[in-house]
Amino acid sequence: MFNKKPLMCAGISAILLVFISLIFTAVNVVFHSVAINIISYVVYAILSSYYFYGFYYLGRKYKNNLLSVMSVIGAVSIVLIYLAMIIGGGTFESKFDQFNQTVSQQEAVLNNLIATNASTEQIAVVQGAMGKSFIEFFGTYLVYLMVFLFVWLIGAVLFDVALIKLKKVEYARVTGIIGLVSIGLALSVFGIFLAVPLMIAYSVMLIVILFSQAKKFKEIR
């Protein structure tokens, strides 16, 4: 399937990602289970791989090594992320439940101290313990999130630069520019509100590129 119609398959995979993610989200709300999460992660990883392969193929077709390399890195990264979520998802949920239980107990103690007019020192001790619980739980994950965002930022910028270099591909240059602008806006406090619609337009344009190129190379007849 990769070899026969890679661009068309990539475009279809991108559309399926949107609709299937909505379906899995709705199903997960009603029937929340680990099995559903694992199935959804596997499906997302497969579809994302097809999606990135389309741009890898496009890079090879137009001798754009940067686009090909970033597409491979993107595909591998997505698969590794979903694999980590499958392996570590249960552990995270267990730790989150423990965190919720601990904070609930501390909150009950705090409310009791306030109701009984306890001393300021006693209340401060419990409040400090609650703050420590938040830091211990979210601190580690915050570091992971910051590292992930930094790596994603570099990868996204390089991918957009590669798109801009696809001068012979219709819509590629403007799509790359939209991507760079949306990243710049997302890094600012108020720009995030403008970045969201731009990112949606960016995603749509990427799909348009795949289908237009599929038509050009007669994958669509």
Image: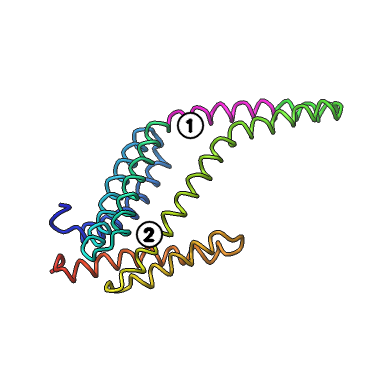
Q: Which mark is residue 56?
A: none
Disc 2 marks a residue whose amino acid type is: Phe
Q: CA distance from mark 2 to mark 1?
A: 31 Å
Q: What residue does disc 1 label?
A: 92
Mark 2, Cα crowd under 10 Å, few <14 / some 14-19 / many 20+, is many
Residue at the location (18% across, 70% down)?
Answer: 215
In the image, residue 214 lies at what x, y percent? 20, 66
| Residue nearest the observer in this picture, 23 or 67 | 67
The rendered magenta stretch, by its main secondary structure, is classed as helix
Residue at the location (37% across, 59% down)?
Answer: 159
Disc 1 marks a residue whose amino acid type is: Phe
Residue at the location (54% across, 64% down)?
Answer: 185
SS class of the residue under badge 1?
Answer: helix
Q: Is 105 included in the stretch rendered in magenta?
A: yes
| Residue nearest the observer in this picture, 67 or 202 | 67
Q: What residue does disc 2 label?
A: 159
